[in-house]
Amino acid sequence: DVKVTQSSRYLVKRTGEKVFLECVQDMDHENMFWYRQDPGLGLRLIYFSYDVKMKEKGDIPEGYSVSREKKERFSLILESASTNQTSMYLCASSSPRTANYGYTFGSGTRLTVV
Amino acid sequence: AQSVTQLGSHVSVSEGALVLLRCNYSSSVPPYLFWYVQYPNQGLQLLLKYTTGATLVKGINGFEAEFKKSETSFHLTKPSAHMSDAAEYFCAVSERDDKIIFGKGTRLHILP
């Protein structure tokens, strides 16, 4: 079964810490995405990547950066965590090559910044 | 620009009753349309999608949706609600550019 794996389900970090959220997919997908999900706001796109070492800003990139050194791994970095970054973070991947168009999501990381 | 509007952030139906979750979209090209479901503390799971062809699309767990171009709608239905259908549902649209835009979600409550 195809998978997108997020390294942590729950994470608690202190204000000002540098936080890494890891996402790995085993489907050889070109595209990877990071969203945050907040009640009443739905899913908001933070960053996405269409290929290794490529990255593009989504709708809310401020306070975040990403890294994609290998095709299967897409990391989201909070340079200096703040309480307003407490949220559910969802990683997804897709490929334009496949007929099965659509995103495959990971299980999410619920981050709390205290 | 593409966008998605889901009518109602919360919908309650009785067990056994019809489920209807509304979704309207805007797109400058023929879109791909999706419904995703999210159970508590989990990621999103694809319920069904429309790309081309038949406008009535059947998905998992007895759900279906109909693409109506004239109404720019893609409403999700299920004839008989089950307690296990309680979840959050997201409608989404793509202009075939590998980028999917999600609605804000509708939380479905099932009343015993």
Image (tube, coloured by chain):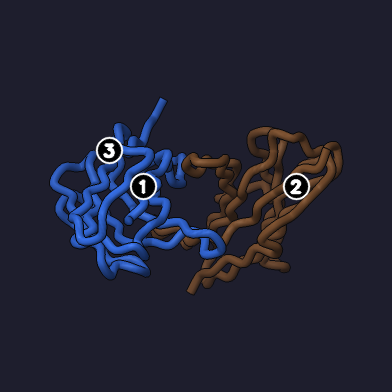
Chain colours: A blue, B brown
- Residue B11 image position (x, y, % from top left): 74, 55
Which amino acid is tagged 1? Cys
- Residue B18 image position (x, y, % from top left): 83, 45
| Of labels 2 and 1, the one closer to you | 1
Mark 2 neighbour density, 10 Å: few (under 14) some (14–19) many (20 or more)? some
- Please tell me which of labels 3 and 1 falls first in the chain: 3
- Residue B100 image position (x, y, % from top left): 45, 58
Local SS, label 3: strand
Q: Is there CB contact under 8 Å for labels 2 and 1? A: no
Which amino acid is tagged 2? Thr
Residue A24, label in figure:
3
Horizontally, residue A56 falls left or right of residue B112, namely left
The residue identified by callout 1 is A91
The residue identified by callout 2 is B77
Give the residue displayed 65% in from the left and 63% down from the top. B6
Which amino acid is tagged 3? Val
